[in-house]
Image (cartoon, helix red, strand yellow):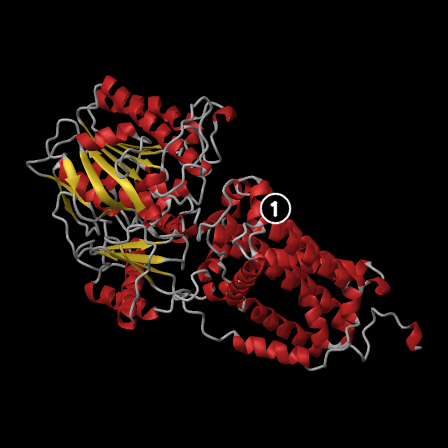
Amino acid sequence: MNENRSPARPDASFHAWSAAWRLALPLVWCLIIAKLFKVQYTNITWLGTGPDDDGPKAYAQWLMGFGWPRLAIAVAVGALMTRVLRRRLRSWLFVLASGAVLVSMAVLRFALPPHRNPIVILLEWLGNSAGELRVFLAVSWREPLAVAAIVLVCGALLRLCPSRWRAMLIGILAGVIVALCGMIAIDLCYLLATGQPFSAPVLLFSAGNLSDLLPLIRSEATPLRVALLAGFVVSAAAWLLLRRNRVLAASPNSVQPRLGLIAAVGGAVALVLPLLPADRMPLERFTEATFLSFARTGFGSPMLQAERNVDRAFEKEGRPPWYSAGMRFVPTPATQRKNVVIVMMESVRASSTPMHVAGLASMPFLARLSAEGMSVRDMSAVVPRTAGAWMAVVGGQYPLTNEGTAEWSRENAKKPRIRGLAHALREQGYATGFFTPTHLGLLNEIEVVKALGFETIRSERDFRRGEESRVGYMGAPDEVMVEPIVQWAASARQHGQPFFAAIMTNIGHHPYTLPEGWVRRSYAVESSGVESSDQRHQSYLNCLSYIDGVLEHLLAELKRADVLQDTIFVFVGDHGQFFGEHAMNQVFNALYDEGVHVPATVYAPGDARVKGVVEGARQQVDIVPTIADLLGFAIEGARLPGKSMFSAPDPKRKLFYSGSIESSYLGMRRGSRKYIYDFDRGPLQAFDLATDPKESNPLPVDDEEGLTVKEELMQWQAAARLSMFARPGTKGALEGGWNRR
């Protein structure tokens, strides 16, 4: 009877822990491959040891400079030969290997100069290989623990499952394993694209906004990343499909029955071990284990006390920390009803402009306006996200994350919470308009613009002359909106109205595509921290040059329409961008200065007050009170977080930052000291911008300082959220009686 039994049929010999380990094998090789890629990526981007050029031959030569790829190839070839060769021929492998070593040594001897001893070279190679292995093991110890924990769960389920349901359960577990392999591939591809590990907040945000993010995802779908994703998933699925019968018939074989259980339990217990100190392993952040990263980032803030403190303050005062639901501009004897134009420049960072890097010719026109007007040397974004910049620059309030901003726009449509610059100037007889050649379809942006109070909104569909005029996946070239803006401004002037125009550019956005016909030039950019050979940065600088040309054209047309002289201009970047700094290529979830330090210029022809350099640290929330100051309006019925840039610099002022994804990063700057906090998923980073402007040398933070900073950050976040969502009750904005929602 036993002889006729199918091997696929479960029987008494079935061993749950052996089956669980066989199921987990695809995870093992996917994690190993992903870790190797991560280590090499770190060597390229962070340690600066990459190949000299981008050719396949250069990469192959560079890769072979490391010991572990050669060792991996040798092991793979040896394993293949032992599978292919007949048993009686396998003894020849020793002879072949020995011969290969002898030939290699002979070649090495003749290739080396006389003073270089081959033995010394061999010893050096062994030492370097040992060092590479130590580093690899140091950054890889979490993966076996994660696999062990998964095996523990799978083995327990198989052990408890009745035999009649075992085949179905194995099918389900195999599907889960394939999905986990896909997650490993996504984590790796995300790292290669952005420079950051994938996380639970990013996953949840991406899943909830997949349709909006598809153009971005498609633009980053390089052949290598597609091959990695497909290879991980297909190889895992093929393995589990071909080995399903063996899993069903799993037995301990030569392995002791309890060995798998002991390893799984031990690995699961070891998951709680403390992390390696960051100062001992700088590769840690870039080679983080996929599953543990997801597990840690799946938890919320550890500082719930901060929210309770903010709630108590709200109950005591009867109003939020900042508010503008009742804001109004009150005329004074100094009031001038000048026009206002705010130009928010897409992805323009300070370190890629001539205002901050001497000799860089990316934006000569804006540099001239800065020299003639008022240049802000130290302007920061609050959230590295375009809609967040609109809220800060036009709304005058601390913006929220992507999720928070979208939620606020929906709530604000029911009951206004924020009255920004457009609301206040409309009450003073201004025509208000928002102009952008983008589609405003990303992450509910159109609703954010509507909530900011503009009576005229023009976007891509109003400007684009056809599908052929589209640039990138965000919209049309900036030049298409120049004529409509000038016409709108001239119309307002003819009707005796001053106007307020908020303009958002498109060119400059990833993937840094230029309009057809634009003549590219090459920039010497070593002084800005990025090599001249970086083609992405070269394309980006050409985008900035294009924006600069459009701005020059816009001001020339406004002058021709006779409205330039009576207009106040504010030019400000919405956020920055990364080009390999800190091993990053994305901005929305990183708070280093390349992402938040933006150029800012105030230009007002004929106004003697708008001259020179603004000293001190400033932030985008300062623009609304600065405009009110320039126009001579007093602000009433509001408590804004910003202050006029005509006020004296405050060395004790605290600037706050937030990543654009919920529960990602928070930051704070006090003087030259800056902190970046990752919700206890990594060490609190501290930098001294005075001595370390590139933020490359984290400073030690003692426990007391760390706790104080974390609490301040969490309380600021809670206060900003409360201020965005609180609405005034029947008693009015100043007298109290506010509601949380």
Q: Which residue is found at the position 21% from the left and 19% from the top?
A: 562
> Which quadrant is the C terminus positioned in?
bottom left
Q: Residues within 10 Å of mark 1 (few under 14, many from 20)?
A: some
Is 455 situated above or below 117? above
Which residue is more in the foreground, 418 or 365? 365
- Asked whether, in this view, residue 437 is left or right of residue 598, the answer is right
Which residue is more in the foreground, 470 or 272? 272
Q: Which residue is mark 1?
A: 226
Three-letter residue code for mark 1: Val
> Mark 1 falls on what kind of element?
helix
- Asked whether, in this view, residue 19 is left or right of residue 564, the answer is right
Which residue is more in the foreground, 355 or 452? 355
- Asked whether, in this view, residue 151 is left or right of residue 580, the answer is right
Is 186 situated above or below 608? below
> Which quadrant is the N terminus positioned in?
bottom right
Q: Quadrant of residue 359?
A: top left
Which residue is more in the foreground, 640 or 191? 191
Q: Which residue is found at the position 75% from the left and 72% from the top?
A: 165
Residue 64 in percent (x, y) is at 59, 51
Q: Quadrant of residue 533?
A: top left
